[in-house]
Image: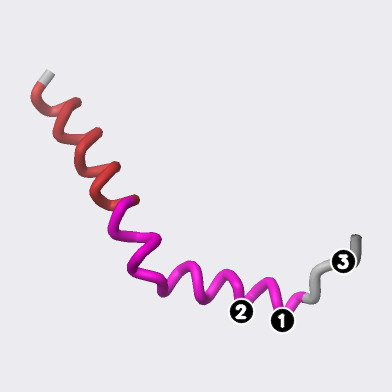
Amino acid sequence: MQPINNREASNWLTSVLTDLHFWVPVAVLIGGLLLLEYIH
């Protein structure tokens, strides 16, 4: 295994942090859990 380049890691991190296809399900999941806690 080759060590990951810092620039590659930051590019990957930036692409994940700006990817709506990643954040929308996460937000829905967290929102659903908070709603369940609120209901109970």
Q: Is residue 5 left or right of residue 14?
A: right
Could you say where residue 1 lies in the image, as x and y percent from the top left? 90, 60
Q: How is the image coloured?
A: secondary structure
Q: Amino acid at mark 2?
A: Asn
SS class of the residue under badge 2?
helix
Mark with earlier residue (3, 2): 3
Q: Residues within 10 Å of mark 1 (few under 14, many from 20)?
A: few
**Displayed quadrant of residue 13:** bottom right
Q: Is residue 1 left or right of residue 36?
A: right
Q: Residues within 10 Å of mark 2 (few under 14, many from 20)?
A: few
Q: Amino acid at mark 3?
A: Pro
Assign the C terminus to one quadrant of the image.
top left
| Of the pair 6 and 19, the residue shown nearer to us | 19
Q: Which mark is residue 7?
A: 1
Residue linked to disc 2: 11
Magenta stretch in the rendered image: 6-25
Could you say where residue 12 lies in the image, as x and y percent from the top left? 60, 72
